[in-house]
Image (cartoon, grey):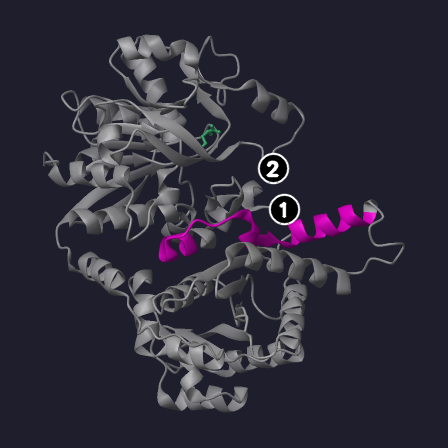
Amino acid sequence: MKKRHKYIFVVGGVMSGVGKGITTASIGKILMARGLSVNPVKIDPYLNVDAGTMNPIEHGEVFVLDSGLECDQDMGNYERFLDITLPSLNYMTSGMVYRTVIARERALEYGGKCVEAVPHIPQEILKRLEASVKKSKADVTTIEVGGTVGEYQNILFIEAARILKLKNPGDVLFVMVSYLPVPSKLGEMKTKPTQYAIRTLNSYGVHPDIIVARSERPLDARRKEKIAESASINPDHIISAPDIDSIYDVPINFEKDGLSKTLLKLLSLKTKKDSDMRGWHDFVKRAHGVKKEVKIAVIGKYFKTGDFALSDAYISVLESLKHAGAKVGVKVVADWLDSEPYEENPKNLKELDNYAGILIPGGFGGRGIEGKISAIGYAREHKIPYFGLCYGMQLAVIEYSRNVLGIKDANTTEIDQKTKNPVVDIMPEQERNLKLGAYGGSMRLGAWPAVLLEGSRAKLAYGSSTISERHRHRYEINPSYVEALEKAGLVFSGMSPDKRLAEIIELPQKVHPFFLATQFHPEFKSSPLNPHPLFVEFIKAAANFKIAK
Ligand code: GLN
C-alpha cells in the first residue's frame, strides 16, 4: 500500500512572536530524529509577493534561498534546524496566491466563472502545497501559518487546511502555539486568552490536536487540565514551553515531553527508530558549556531601534556567530554599535579597542556609511579581526581605495551617483531595473558559484576550489579597479567563474590576523551541525586576538 503523506499545520493563538517558527522547526527536528523525512512549508498571510520589499528592522530578516526567493526568516530557522536546502515551493504569501489566481482569470482559465475568494484562493493554496509535497518526496509536511487565529489575513489558509483534513482523514494534525500571560499584578498564569483562541479556531471548523503553551514559566497541572477541558483534548497533548535561553533547546525539551511519540500516534505513523539526536545534544552541550567570552562589535546604522528588533533583523548573522562559537569553544557576545558617532567624532572609534572582532553585515543606503568606512579603516590599521558581509565588503573596498590606493573620492554609486571613482558600481541590468521602478525580486539573488584562489585564506577555510553562496545585492566591485587594488595588496580570493565579479576579498595572513569580506551572505548557509567555515575562521581569529586593554 502506498504510504500516505502526513501534514502538520502549526497555527498561532493569542499573539504572534512567541516562537511558532522555532516550534515548527523543532517538530521537524524531532520527527527527523525518528528517521522520517520532513518538508517544512511557511505561509505568510501578507499581500507582499515576497519578503524582499519589507524593512528588516520592522519585519525581521529577509532570508534568501538558493533559488533567489526572498522570504521570511523562519525559512532560515527550518534550514538551520533540519540541515536541508529548501526550494521556493516551500514558501507562499497571500500576494503570490492572489497574483496567480488573478493572472489565471485574465487568461480566461476559469471558463467564464465568477472568480471568488472561496473556493478559488484555497484551491490555489492547496495546489501549491501539493506541488511542494510532490517535489519533496518527504513523509511529513509541516505548514506554519503566519499570524494568529482570528486575523482576517490568514482565514483562507486555515480554510484550505480544513479542506485538506476533510479529504485526508487521519493524515492532518493541527498544532496551536499559544501564549499564557502572567500579569505582574496578579502573579498568576492566565488561560483565558488561550481558551478564546481555541474557540476562534473551532469557529473555522478546525480543532487543535496539540497545544504548545508558551509562557514565562512552565505550565502547572491545574492549568494544563483547565486548557485540556475547555479544548476537549488529552492533557498529554498540551506541551509546556516556558521561556528558555537558547532556541536550540526547544527540540530537546519537546522530546522530554514525548512529543514525537504523541505526533506519531496521532498520525498513525510507524517508525522503528528511537529518537536519535546525538549530534544536536552534542552541539547544545558544547554551546552551553563554553566559558571564554569573545566580544564582537556588529556595526550598523541602528538609530532608534532596540536590541530586540536588531536581533531579528540579523538573526542569521547572530546564529552563525553562535554556531562558530560552539565549534571554536568560545561564547560569542555580539554588541550592536552605531556607526554614526564615528562620523561625529573619530575619537569615538576608540570603543572598538574593547572588541576581539568587528563585523559589518549587509545594508542599504547612505546613513552611517562614512562611520562604517572609518571603522573598517580602524580594524585594518589596528589589526583587529574584520569580517564584512555584502555591504561590509563593498565598504572595505572603498576604504582600501581611499586610504591605501589614495583615491580620496572613491565611493559607491549607491551613495554618490556622480562620483568620479565608482569603485563599487551598479551593473547595467540593475540600472535598467531601477529606471523601470522594478524593485521587487530584481537584485542579484540566490546561489552563485565562485572560484577560490589557491593558497588564500578563503580556500584554506572552505577546503575546496569552487563554492556556491547566496547573494542579495544590486551593486558590485567595479572590475576596472581590481588590478590597481591587487597591486596595492588587496587579495581577490573569490571570483565568479567568468572572473567578472569579485566575490571575496582578503588581506594576507602576514599583513593582518583576519581581514576578509564577502559579496555574498555566508550567514544564510550556516547551521549548528555545519557551522560556516568563514565564520569559524573569523571567530578563531577573534578568540586568539589579544585585546589591548
Ligand atoms: N546595498 C548594497 C547593494 O545593493 C549591499 C546589499 C547588502 O548588503 N545586502 O549592493
Q: Residue shown at 37%/50% (left/top)?
A: 311
- For badge 1, the amino acid type reads Val
| Residue 315 visible in the snapshot | yes
- For badge 2, the amino acid type reads Gly
The quadrant of the rendering that contains the N terminus is bottom right
Looking at the magenta stretch, what is its main secondary structure? helix
The residue that disc 1 covers is 49
Q: Is mark 2 within 8 Å of ligand 1?
A: no
> Secondary structure under badge 1?
loop
The residue that disc 2 covers is 440
428 displayed left or right of 400: right
302 displayed left or right of 53: left
Q: Residue shown at 43%/19% (left/top)?
A: 498
Query: Does the stretch in magenta take in 81?
Result: yes
What is the count of numbered marks? Answer: 2
Range shown magenta: 77-105
Q: Residue shown at 62%/26% (left/top)?
A: 433
Query: Does the stretch in magenta take in 198?
Result: no
Q: Position of residue 257 (x, y in %)?
A: 34, 79
Q: Position of residue 537 (x, y in %)?
A: 21, 37
Q: Relative to the observer, which residue lies in front, 376 or 35?
A: 35
Question: From the viewer's perspective, is residue 537 above or below residue 223?
Answer: above
